[in-house]
Image: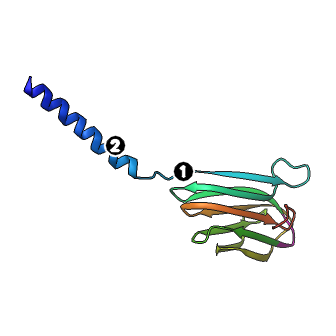
């Protein structure tokens, strides 16, 4: 009978210790929400996007957009420690812009007119950013 009580007591003690340990450790969520604004009547070509959430590992977002001869990429990044790498390719797949940006940024670059792609590489951590391509999205503020 004493052995059974010792075994039950041991399991209860282990359960209590594990509960205290996991109860004090705050788990970070993993996931982002991406809201897109499309160009005119398109269901594919993106004019702007907002990114919010928290990710544990680096994530990459690929979007299709329409590039002009002279382009502007505006980023409002409310995350103070994060960086976002932006890589823009034209319709021929050639890289026309690439930069790691931190905080708010407005960059201009030239490319061929036509469909292109933008690859955004997000670092782990809290995400809260707005990306606007050629000023075709909602107001920056």
Residue 103 % position (x, y)? 66, 73
Residue 93 % position (x, y)? 72, 63
Q: Quadrant of the N terminus?
A: top left
- Per the image, the residue denoted by label 2 is 19
Q: Is 46 on the left-hand or right-hand side of 32? A: right
Residues packed near mark 2 inside 10 Å, few (<14), some (14 to 19) or many (20 plus): few
Which mark is nearer the camera, 1 or 2? 2
* Magenta span main SS: strand
Q: Is 31 on the left-hand or right-hand side of 105? A: left
Q: Is residue 131 visible to us here?
A: yes
Among the 4 quarters of the image, the one containing residue 134: bottom right
What residue lies at 56% left-to-right and 64% top-to-bottom? 123
70 in the magenta segment = yes
What residue lies at 78% left-to-right and 70% top-to-bottom? 73
Q: Secondary structure at mark 1?
A: loop
Q: Nearer the viewer, residue 27 or 66?
A: 27
What residue lies at 72% left-to-right and 75% top-to-bottom? 105
116 in the magenta segment = no
| Residue at the extreme top | 1
Q: Is 38 on the left-hand or right-hand side of 87? A: right
Give the alpha-carbon distance from disc 1 to disc 2, as whole Å. Answer: 22 Å
Q: Nearer the viewer, residue 45 or 35?
A: 35
Q: Nearer the viewer, residue 63 or 77?
A: 77
Among the 4 quarters of the image, the one containing residue 121: bottom right
Contact, CB < 8 Å: mark 1 with mark 2? no
Q: Is 126 on the left-hand or right-hand side of 107? A: left
Residue segment shown in magenta: 67-71
Q: Which mark is residue 88?
A: none
- Per the image, the residue denoted by label 1 is 30
Q: Is residue 94 visible to us here?
A: no
């Amino acid at each position: 009978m004493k052995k059974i009580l010792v075994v039950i007591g041991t399991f209860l003690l282990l359960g209590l210790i594990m509960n205290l340990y996991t109860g004090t450790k705050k788990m970070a969520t993993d996931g982002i929400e991406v809201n897109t604004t499309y160009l005119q009547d398109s269901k594919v070509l993106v004019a702007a996007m907002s990114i919010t959430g928290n990710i544990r590992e680096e994530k990459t977002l690929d979007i299709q957009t329409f590039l002009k001869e002279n382009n502007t990429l505006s980023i409002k990044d409310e995350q103070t420690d994060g960086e976002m790498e932006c890589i823009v390719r034209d319709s021929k797949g050639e890289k026309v812009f690439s930069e790691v940006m931190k905080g708010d940024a407005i960059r201009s670059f030239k490319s061929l007119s036509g469909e292109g792609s933008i690859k955004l590489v997000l670092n782990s951590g809290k995400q809260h950013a707005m990306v606007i391509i050629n000023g075709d999205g909602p107001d920056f503020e």
